Image (cartoon, rainbow, N blue to C red):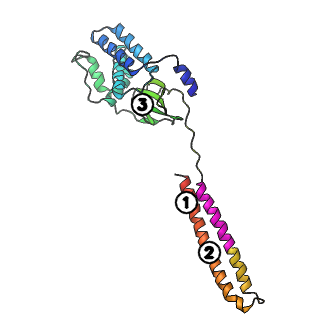
Amino acid sequence: MLLFVAAAFADCSATTADVQLTLEDAEAAFGRLDIVGFRAATDQANADVKCLREVAPRPLAARLHRLEGLRWWADGDLARAHASFAAARAIEPGFAFPEALVPPGHPVLAEYAASDPLTGGETRVPAPEAAVIWFDGRAADSRPDARATLAQLVATSGDVRASALLWPGEALFPYDVARPVKKGPNLPFSIAAGVTLAAGAVCYGLAAADYDTFHDPNTASADLPGLQNSTNALYFSSIGAGVLALGSGVGAVVAGHW
């Protein structure tokens, strides 16, 4: 799947500087009431975003959302305008439009103020394989539900593999989902548990054999003290080995799931 995304991405390339210049053109066109030029510049910014080979910093993402909001307000799509304005306000809550761009009393200011950046929650997205997803210039595992967002797939090497401006409810670009790491008992602890358990079993077996010999009527009296000491030593050794085996077994399970 990543190869498919990379192939689609290979035919174009844009930098954050390219997007910045295009947004400046869009702002200048809006400020002089050149709606045709403004639409053309925002269309170009959208195309550049799809080819962006660098992670967009948060101020650039906010600027993009603000210009998108102006574009959709001008086109009469208030739902997308609010989604864009809310995204911009979530990133830069203290921003105020310069008067050269939006003069005081302009009706778009009321729409901008009405776009609540806290509306809606977030949805967790599947973790990608050997990559991280960035939303609006920040690595995250969740995307906003009710705001527009600039999503980028960034490989562990730092290469941007996909980039898209997404609207609420719009699907993410395709990517390989990380496979869950299978975990099991820790091998060194498991081996230690097996060895000590076997040693305990051997000690217990030898203790049992000495015990039987101790109680055998044919055993010489002179051998009884030695057999008693040997039986006790082997018996307690088997208990000690059993405790060690139990501890190693618990350690194998605990260490294997961290």
Q: Place residue 123 in its image quadrant.
A: top left
Q: Amino acid at mark 2?
A: Ser
* CB-based contact (under 8 Å), mark 1 and mark 2: no
Q: Earlier in the sequence, mark 2 or mark 3?
A: 3
Q: Residues within 10 Å of mark 2 (few under 14, many from 20)?
A: some
Q: CA distance from mark 1 to mark 2?
A: 21 Å
Circle 3: residue type: Phe
Q: Nearer the viewer, residue 116 or 125?
A: 125
| Tag 3 residue | 135
* Tags 2 and 3 touching, CB below 8 Å: no
Q: Position of residue 76 (x, y in %)?
A: 36, 15
Q: Residue 120: give x, y in percent of width and height.
A: 39, 33
Residue 166 appears in the picture as rendered: no
Which tag, 1 or 2, sits closer to the chain's start?
2
Q: Position of residue 191 (x, y in %)?
A: 63, 59
| Amino acid type for the residue under numbered disc 1 | Gly
Q: Which residue is mark 2?
A: 237
Figure check: 184 above or below 176:
below
- Badge 1 marks a residue whose secondary structure is helix
Query: Helix, strand, or loop for circle 2?
Result: helix
How far is mark 2 from mark 3, CA to CA?
Answer: 61 Å
Badge 1 density bin: few <14, some 14–19, many ≥20, Cα 10 Å: some
Question: Magenta residues?
Answer: 186-203
Residue placed most toward the observer, 71 or 95: 95
Q: Which residue was labeled with disc 1?
A: 251
